[in-house]
């Protein structure tokens, strides 16, 4: 299952500056694990031992995964994952 | 519905507050109150569109009030502009918010963002918040007791290091877009359109993409559940946030 993952600015240091990457997985958790193999360190920035970090939001096709099945949210080929971190600047 | 009788509190007169306040003044909002503790710096001028080079060194709220008054007059929409020179503080936040019909928040730190969200909810006043760094940012309108709040979406002040605009910079048009989104959401709410709330806007300037996700109230959100019933300062103090 190939999905597109949109990478926010603060995490692009881990993706060689790429703002969008491809990853494999049939759930959000699998996609994050796959990202970690390609871009080491990214999982720790997204998740802690309780799940998705509190100041990070992950959207599967524009829907907040907290209101789907969280990290177990199923994905289909061609889906898009967006990562929206808390940002304070103004 | 006219907005001439409406009062709006603007927390943060920077890159987001500038375009938002300008739009509201020109749209005929009757009264604006500006809260900011900062002075105009030359490094602000590329994105903080309320200020000019000869304002450098002046308190932002005073320079902003002059400009907003002139803009409102120029648009034939006279607006009363009050200023609070200082940060939004826990001991006065709820009373200050309660004197307004809506709050726009574009502060540069998480403590003020969460204090504003809490004070608005406890005062029963809608709030439109936003944040931006480099090429991206977000905006969210919340109506108390009805739609998702800042704590539903981002839960609490991050304890990890998070970049701020002071460290990473912010691109002028990014806050221009998001400040304009805030103003549009504010005008919709002031006109009674409750559908404006509960949608998270995410702007990515390098893609030219403005996306929206409907966000729901989070089960267990302490603000929506009523577990947060005051704004004592301990809630907004962390060791790690810049």
Image: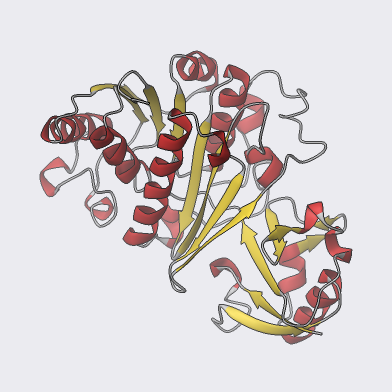
Residue B165 in view in this figure: yes
Relative horizontal placement of residue A5, taking residue B113 as reference (left or right)? right
Residue at 79%, 74% in the rendered image: A32
Q: Position of residue A50 (x, y in %)?
A: 87, 54
Percent x, y of residue B80: 24, 20
- Counting labels gives 0
As drawn, A87 above or below B56: below
Residue B175's place in the image compared with B35, above or below, is below
Q: Residue at x 54, y 23 (%)?
A: B125
Residue at x 54% of width, y 17% of height = B94
Q: Residue at x 76, y 67 (%)?
A: A44
Residue B81 screen position, x and y as percent: 25, 23
Q: Is residue B89 above or below residue A84?
A: above
Q: Position of residue B55 (x, y in %)?
A: 15, 41
Q: Is residue A2 above or below residue B100?
A: below
Whether residue B155 is visible, yes or no, is no
Q: What is the quadrant of residue B65 in the picture? A: top left
In the image, taking residue B45 as reference, residue A32 lies left or right, namely right
**Left or right: A67 as drawn, with respect to B209:** right
């Amino acid at each position: 299952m190939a999905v597109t993952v949109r990478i926010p600015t603060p995490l692009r240091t881990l993706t060689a500056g790429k703002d969008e990457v491809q990853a494999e997985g049939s759930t959000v958790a699998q996609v994050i694990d796959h990202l970690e193999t390609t871009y080491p360190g990214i999982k720790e920035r997204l998740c802690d031992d309780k799940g998705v970090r509190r100041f990070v939001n992950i959207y599967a096709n524009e829907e907040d995964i907290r209101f789907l099945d969280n990290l177990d949210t199923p994905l289909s080929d061609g889906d898009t994952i967006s990562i929206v971190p808390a940002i304070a600047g103004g | 519905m006219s907005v001439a009788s409406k009062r709006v509190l603007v927390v943060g007169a920077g890159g987001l507050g500038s375009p938002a306040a300008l739009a509201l003044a020109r749209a005929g909002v009757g009264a604006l109150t500006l809260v900011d503790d900062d002075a105009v710096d030359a490094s602000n001028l590329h994105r903080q569109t309320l200020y000019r080079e000869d304002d450098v060194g002046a308190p932002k709220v005073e320079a902003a009030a002059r400009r907003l008054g002139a803009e409102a007059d120029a648009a034939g929409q006279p607006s009363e502009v009050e200023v609070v020179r200082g940060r939004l503080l826990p001991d006065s936040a709820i009373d200050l918010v309660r004197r307004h019909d809506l709050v726009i928040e574009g502060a540069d730190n998480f403590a003020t963002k969460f204090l504003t969200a809490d004070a608005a909810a406890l005062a029963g006043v809608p709030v439109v918040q936003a944040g931006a760094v480099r090429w991206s940012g977000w905006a969210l309108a919340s109506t108390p007791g009805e739609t998702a709040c800042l704590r539903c979406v981002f839960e609490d002040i991050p304890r990890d290091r998070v970049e701020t605009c002071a460290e990473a910079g912010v691109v002028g048009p990014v806050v221009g877009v998001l400040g304009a989104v805030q103003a549009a959401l504010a005008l919709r709410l002031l006109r009674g359109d409750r559908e404006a709330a509960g949608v998270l806007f995410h702007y990515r300037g390098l893609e030219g993409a403005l996306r929206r996700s409907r966000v729901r109230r989070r089960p267990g959100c302490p603000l929506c559940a009523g577990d947060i019933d005051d704004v004592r300062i301990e809630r907004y103090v962390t060791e790690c946030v810049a």
